[in-house]
Amino acid sequence: MSESNATLTFNQTVKGICDFLEVAIHSILYVRQIYPADLFVRRKKYDTPVFQSRHPGLNEYISGAVKAVGEELVQGTVSKVVVVVKDKDEVALERFVFALESMIQVEVFNKDTSVVNAMTPAALSQYFRSFLVKLSMIEAQLGQMYLGDDVTFAIVLELKDDQAPTASTVKGDPPPWLPADGQHTTAGASEEAQVHVVRAVNTGVINLSLTVQESDVKLRREKEMYG
């Protein structure tokens, strides 16, 4: 099998998903106007334009969170990564839900071996491109945010079967995860929340899907505002 046709390894899939998550989080912050547009710089990733924050502290928070997600992905414990858009009172307005499902069990010594029937790295990059294109147009479905300085975000990690995150002891690693506010998690969504399916990909190693939940609070406020 030529290198270009080689299928994904477990470690390639984890790294690929983490790289994508970092780009996607920056894109969400830009598209949902969590911070002013001039805080972002235009870049290119997966052959499509993306926007990246220029704020060192924000970038460090995002990269640290994604690194910690990667550690849990290797353990096979991740269920969802959620980017919660919330107001000044910590009330969830939108949840961008990256659901992750491990399809195979891989022994440590096989994690750099190509997985049979998995997709190629090039194919995965094309899927990531389509995710980002869909994200860039999400405002058409969600409408604009009008909260100005009163909106912020958090990254929430949901693990399988209520497992606790792995505590890292390596110097320089991000701090351990803190318990999340229950209403920021997917379990905190009410039956009145609206769900939008963005994209999904079955890699053959770890499957990934992205949905967006608009909270009942956001929908109710918009109804009151616009009638």
Image (tube, rainbow, N blue to C red):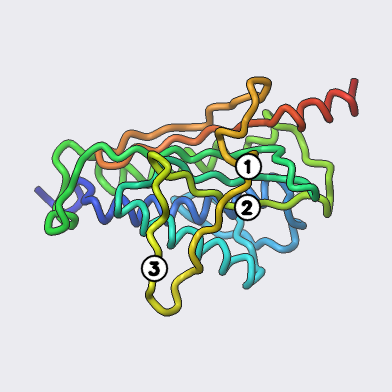
Residue at point 52% right, 43% down? 132
Q: Which residue is mark 3?
A: 168
The secondary element bearing badge 3 is classed as loop
Between 82 and 2, the residue placed more toward the observer is 82
Which residue corresponds to mark 1? 184
The amino acid on which the numbered mark 1 sits, given as a three-letter code, is His
Q: Which-is-in-front pick, marks 1 and 2? A: 1
The answer to whether residue 224 is visible is: yes
27 versus 135 height, above or below: below
In the depicted structure, whether residue 89 falls above or below residue 112: above
Report x, y in % for residue 141: 67, 28
Q: Are marks 1 and 2 in contact (CB under 8 Å)?
A: yes
Spatial separation of the CA atoms under disc 1 and disc 3: 24 Å
Does residue 143 sit above or below 82 in this rendering?
A: above
Relative side of 73 to 172, left or right: left
Kindly identify which residue carries mark 2.
154
The amino acid beneath tag 3 is Ser
Residue at horizontal 82%, vertical 51%? 150
